[in-house]
Image: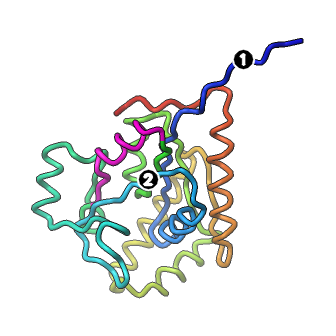
Amino acid sequence: MVDIPELNPAPPLLVVLSGPSGVGKDAALDGLKRLDRPWHFAITATTRPPRSGEQDGVDYIFLDTETFLKMKDRDQFLECAEVYGKWYGVPRSQVRQALKNGKDVILKIDVQGAATVRKLAPEALSLFMLPASYAELRSRLNGRMSESAPDLELRLQTAQEELAQVSQFDYRVINRDGGLEQAIADIDAIIAAEKCRVVPRVVQFL
């Protein structure tokens, strides 16, 4: 009879959820929170104004530019970047403390930020969310009606460039129109599968 070795719990994962603007990352994140898994959802700080219905400290941490840049100078962000004229950044303390507590951490960040995190933490699990077609993405951004026409065209142009970077990620998750629940289930399944790896991912950069 072969003895089964004692197995240690899988180490916590650092999960990067990225993709172009308008692809549905926020909606997917809301769905993942409803699954009630033992995950920590890092809240991004930003200098952009809140959109209708967004809550400070829940959807984003809304900061004025001066406060944000002071935190940046003190190296208090895991990654930060200026996107469409506004700053976005993930507070380093959120990620460090959650991983220390043994919780998987989920970061929702743009493609530029994802590249930064991959350099800092090569063992991070990176997921790229994309639409079923470019036409779907244009339709979603049009329906959001939160950008002016020039801003919309800039986001669409940037999205084309970001979609070309899907090969840099570990997994792709397609969010088709009407298929959000399947996209959420796919993300949940990917994380579950990664926790079963024989050789686990170990994040050691913090």
Residue 160, image x and y in percent?
49, 65
Q: Position of residue 65 (x, y in %)?
A: 14, 64
Give the magenta range. Answer: 88-102
Left or right: where 80 falls relative to 35:
left
Q: Residues within 10 Å of mark 1 (few under 14, many from 20)?
A: few
Which of discs 1 and 2 lies nearer the camera? The answer is: 1
Magenta segment includes 164: no
Q: Is residue 17 left or right of residue 190?
A: left
> 126 or 150: nearer the eye?
126
Q: Quadrant of residue 146?
A: bottom left
Main secondary structure of the magenta stretch:
helix
The residue lying furthest to the right in this view is 1
> Mark 1 or mark 2, which has the lower sequence index?
1
**Number of the label disc, if any, that sits on residue 113:** none
Is residue 92 found inside the magenta-colored segment of the image?
yes
Q: Which quarter of the rendering shows the C terminus?
A: top left
Callout 2 crowding tier (Cα within 10 Å): few <14, some 14–19, many ≥20:
many
Provide the residue designation for mark 2. Answer: 107
Residue beneath the point at 72% across and 17% down: 5
Above/below status of 7 relative to 14: above
Residue in the picture at 46% in, 60% down: 161
Is 202 or 16 nearer to us in this picture? Answer: 202
165 w.r.t. 152: above or below:
above
Q: Quadrant of residue 204?
A: top left
Q: Which residue is mark 1?
A: 5
Q: CA–CA distance between discs 1 and 2?
A: 33 Å
The local secondary structure at tag 2 comes to: strand
Q: Position of residue 48 (x, y in %)?
A: 25, 72
Question: In the image, what residue occupies the spot 29% across and 71% down?
Answer: 56
167 or 24: nearer the viewer: 24
